[in-house]
Image: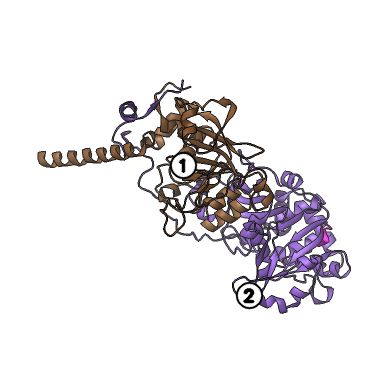
Amino acid sequence: MLTKKITRQELLIIAASRQIQNGDVSILGIGLPIIAGAVAKKTHAPEAVLMMESGICDFEPRVLPMHVADASATRGYGYATDLFSVFSTITYAGYLDKAFLGVGQIDKFGNINTSYLGTPPGAPRISAAGGAPEFYAYAKKTILTMKGGQFVEKLPYLTSPGYLGGGSQREDSGRYTPGSGPSVLLTSKGIFKFDEETREMYLAALFPGVCVDTVKADVPWDLKIADTLESFPVPTDEEIRALREFSPRASFPSPVAVQLVFENFKRKIAAKKAARKAG
Amino acid sequence: MAANNGSKVMTTKEAISRFVNDGDSLITGNYNESMPMSLLFEIIRQKKRGLTYYSQSGSFDGEFMAFSGCMEKMISAFVYKWGGSTRGGIIEQYQRAGKIQVEDYTNFTYNARLAAGAFGYSCLPVLPAIMDSDVFKIRGFMGDKKFGVITCPFTGKQTPVVPAANPDVCVLHVQRADKFGNAQHWGGLGSTVHACLASRKIIVSCEELVEPDIIKSSPHHTIVPGFRVSAVIEEPFGCHPFEIVGFRGLDTAMFSLINQAFKIDGGLDVFFDEWIYGLPDRSAYIQHYIEVFGQDMLNRYNARSYYSAPANYGIPFQSGWDINGISNDLGVDMEGLEKLIEERGELVDVN
């Protein structure tokens, strides 16, 4: 049950967290996925095996890691391996249940660009490939999250293949784990899924307070809408508490969080100064 | 999804009957040391048949698997004649008589097949000199699929490749494991890690079943993560008469008894009846050892401890909150955070 007031950011994190089932072997990237994993492990999925691609496997999230080899994740973890092993013995060999990937640009079949907004070397950069193409290809399921990204008709650069041209193209190529691919895309406007036959993205649930037209305005193709829209998952107090205990700043949009952290440090420094003066 | 909800602890009998089937390919995870003898004895007792057995190293495990009738095919890189030069080994006798088929690899190419299997690859390049060896040229039951040759796209050179091996079951003995199957082992690892990770099911016996906290404070010793393991058995002396670092050395008394059994007519039948078929499990085996050799003899092989220095996994912040319940990032307590969320957060109405 939910009695607390919550924010849009919290709602999105809990929606992502619900994607992890107890016992799932999951690879988590920095930011939202780690927070979602931390909440899942503290609530409905205590035996989830959380991993980061540096080789930190089966870790206990304590504080928000700043990068995928962050020392804070190495207090009390089960299996010290390395990046090559994570991609080969765990991912390609078929033992990775869930991957979480962030999206820069996405097309209607879930193909993703996280590299360039055009053709290099002249094009502006988004970031780069990182671990995304291989995790996306070989995790049994992938959960996509998009904050401030874009839906596009045609990607200027395809970093991580999704359902390619749709239909059975991904399966037929023989290059991917059978049954793999994006299962959902979570954004601050809704939850999107992919049609079982055509593999085209459709709107499955609306974020509270958002209407279909607002979603459609972001999408350059004629977005299909589920016959019956699902309702967006409602967090419980337990989930919200787990989230806030793990990362209180995650409840705010990131510019606000940065500002709040800065204000806290300013207060601390001012208090030190005042104490010195008084002393 | 990996079957990792809760405990996988069971008995050796249960693990072998649940996870080893007739016709399976089976591999010993251990390489020369800490051989998983308790698990292998149980496979023999349960009379599994038609197994393809992978064993790299010429210990008597392979001889036992042949003599027991469990093994139909073998993949190996080293075969020792336990019966001596005149009597010969069991594997040798059975191979020559056509009772079993053996495929020979080298230590490196044997391990490369497991590495390929562990990585999920279909094949792996190996070192080119093997192409001039009869190990490459003479093919047993693997036939055309024993080795392949590809052209390196970068050098243009002919490069031999081996096919991935993915045994159905790996049997492994380790120092310690937790109930989830996280298995920790140290010592002469040989091809152990690849043998385990290449296999579809992994059965782990351990000297000590420990709390998960022990594993989580020493993750660098974990060679197999729990989510890959099907069964865990606490089985002290599970590798006897082989050694296991930190517990005991190789039991030369028992080894000489086994050596004798190989070298006299009917010796192995007597040994199997007395030490395998005649005893229900490992604790009965050790009890029987004590009756035959005495407790003193068993104690003679106990390890004298020599501890590895602990690795410090310390970090500054155990959570994002200080001891007074104040957030390190935001400088407020939980109540203060709720207020901050109302003032500065983007509230959403979910009802």
| Residues packed near mark 1 inside 10 Å, few (<14), some (14 to 19) or many (20 plus) | some
Q: Is residue B272 left or right of residue B194?
A: right
Q: Residue at x 72, y 56 (%)?
A: B167
A19 w.r.t. A124: above or below: above
Q: Colour of chain A?
A: brown
Pinpoint residue B336: horizontal percent, then vertical percent. Answer: 30, 28
Pinpoint residue A71: horizontal percent, then vertical percent. Answer: 41, 51
Which residue was labeled with disc 1?
A: A150
- Quarter occupied by the N terminus of chain B: top right
Label 1 with label 2: CB-CB less than 8 Å: no
Residue closer to the observer: B47 or B23 = B23
The chain coloured purple is B
Going by the numbered disc 1, the residue's amino acid type is: Gln
A34 w.r.t. B248: above or below: above
In the rendered image, residues at marks 1 and 2 fall on the same chain: no
Going by the numbered disc 2, the residue's amino acid type is: Gly
Which residue was labeled with disc 2?
A: B156
Pinpoint residue A36: horizontal percent, then vertical percent. Answer: 47, 38
